[in-house]
Amino acid sequence: MEIAVKLLVPVLLAGLMLAPAAHARVCAVSIDSTDQMSFSQKEIKVGADCSQVKLILRHTGKLAATAMGHNWVLTRTPDYQPVAMAGMRTSLADSYLPKGDARVLAHTAVIGGGQTTSVTFSTAKLAKGGDYTFFCSFPGHFAMMKGKLVFG
């Protein structure tokens, strides 16, 4: 009996360590951007059961990233304009975002016409019902290219 318990304990511990992974759910979301400085959606809804989000951004236009590049950036709504303004002082190589800025919850690289990119991020930093804004940080685009992310 004692040997059986000793064998059972590691099996149970292994099962507990795998349990969170078994419940992990990656939710895929797609959004398009255009040469007319617009996103195809003004609101993205993510279910509360999603532990990660894979966001796919397509640029359906024809213009190069240097002329009409787009990315997808997620911040808390109060941080959206300050991050966008700080990003205007950076470069395309930095995706027009301040390096290492904790206010940026997720972002893609800047892409040009005909290109696609993606980012996968954890929802652990998101609060159900929280106030989140997504936007394009290419200089000047954030005023028109923005929307709301709803979690939960």
Image (cartoon, rainbow, N blue to C red):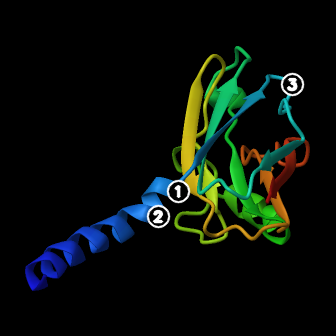
* Nearest to viewer (mark 1 / mark 3): 1
Q: Earlier in the sequence, mark 1 or mark 3?
A: 1
Residue flagged by tag 1: what amino acid is it? His
Q: Nearer the viewer, residue 71 or 32?
A: 32
User: Looking at the image, which residue sits at the far left?
Assistant: 3
- Say if mark 3 contacts mark 2, CB within 8 Å: no
- Mark 2 secondary-structure assignment: helix
At 68% from the left and 56% from the top, the residue drawn is 49
Q: CA distance from mark 1 to mark 2?
A: 5 Å
Mark 1 in CB contact with mark 2 (< 8 angstroms): yes
| Quadrant assignment, res 121 | bottom right
Secondary structure at badge 3 equals loop
- Residue at 72% x, 18% y is 60
**Residue linked to disc 1:** 23
Name the residue rendered at 23%, 78% in the picture: 9
Residue 111 image position (x, y, % from top left): 61, 31
Residue 129: image quadrant is bottom right
Q: Is disc 2 surrounded by few (<14), some (14 to 19) or many (20+) residues within 10 Å?
A: few
Which comes sooner in the sequence, label 3 or label 2?
2
Position of residue 115 relative to residue 38, above or below, is above
Q: Residue at x 73, y 29 (%)?
A: 68
Q: Name the residue beneath numbered marker 3.
A: 36
Residue that badge 2 annotates: 20
Check the picture and name the quadrant holding the N terminus. bottom left
Quarter holding the C terminus is bottom right
Using the image as rendered, state which of residue 69 and residue 11 is in the foreground: 11
